């Protein structure tokens, strides 16, 4: 009878040890990833139009790029066109997006002339960001895209 009691006790301790180790594994595995906190704006977007604006906010030119893409994730915003990649730091606060291409971008003229992004720190209002469309409104451009 004594042998059975010890056997049950060791079995209970083994199950408890297994449960505790499983919980520790689950908690530690979750800490290895960085989760996005930007919501629907994160992801890959194909730029469908860039409307360049003057100082009064009037459209001066509308560009319809063919193969321009934006990738947004964590604290980075990257623009892609063929072999050109421009990377900028970004910060989202509510419906405002701040993008800084001044320190990490390698092609500022291309950004301004083709994508409507400035080569310095710039702020954009997030007009639309859902599962299908993205519209960013800046002081000098309105950038529209679709999820890619």
Image (cartoon, grey):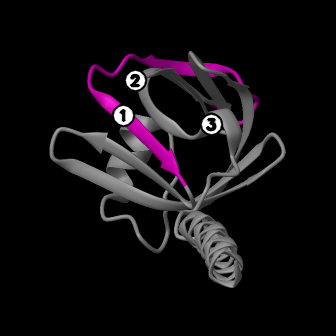
Q: Earlier in the sequence, mark 2 or mark 3?
A: 3
User: Badge 3, how many Cα within 10 Å: few under 14, some, many 20+?
Assistant: many
User: Badge 1, how many Cα within 10 Å: few under 14, some, many 20+?
Assistant: many
Residue plotted at (84% across, 45% down): 94
Judged from this view, the residue extending furthest toward the left is: 83
Residue plotted at (49% across, 20% down): 61
Quarter of the image for residue 14 reads bottom right
Viewport quadrant of the C terminus: top left
Closer to the eye: label 1 or 3: 3
Quarter of the image for residue 28 reads bottom right
Judged from this view, the residue extending furthest toward the right is: 94
In the rendered view, tell whether residue 68 sits above or below residue 32. above
Q: Can the viewer see residue 72 in this picture? A: yes
Q: Marks 3 and 1: in contact by CB < 8 Å?
A: no
Judged from this view, the residue extending furthest toward the front is: 1
Q: Which residues are magenta?
A: 54-73
Q: What whole-number distance in Å separates the C-alpha atoms at marks 2 and 3?
A: 12 Å
Q: Marks 1 and 2: in contact by CB < 8 Å?
A: yes
Residue beneath label 2, please? 148
Residue beneath label 1, please? 69
Q: What whole-number distance in Å separates the C-alpha atoms at marks 1 and 3?
A: 14 Å
In the rendered view, tell whether residue 91 sits above or below residue 25. above
Residue plotted at (52% across, 51% down): 73
- The label shown at residue 139 is none
Viewport quadrant of the N terminus: bottom right
Residue beneath label 3, please? 41
Magenta stretch contains residue 60: yes
Percent coordinates x, y for residue 19 in the rendering: 65, 67
Pick the front one: 14 or 90: 14
């Amino acid at each position: 009878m004594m042998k059975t009691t010890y056997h049950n006790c060791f079995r209970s301790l083994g199950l408890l040890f297994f449960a505790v180790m499983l919980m520790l594994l689950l908690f530690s595995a979750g800490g290895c990833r960085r989760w996005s906190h930007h919501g629907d704006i994160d992801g890959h977007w194909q730029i469908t139009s860039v409307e360049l604006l003057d100082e009064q906010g009037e459209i001066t030119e509308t560009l319809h790029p063919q193969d321009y893409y934006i990738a947004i994730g964590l604290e980075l915003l990257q623009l892609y066109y063929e072999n050109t990649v421009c990377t900028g730091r970004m910060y989202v606060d509510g419906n405002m997006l701040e993008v800084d291409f001044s320190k990490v971008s390698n092609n500022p003229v291309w950004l301004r002339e083709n994508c409507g992004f400035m080569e310095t720190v710039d702020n954009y209002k997030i007009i639309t960001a859902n599962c299908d469309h993205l519209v960013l409104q800046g002081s000098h451009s309105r950038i529209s895209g679709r999820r890619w």
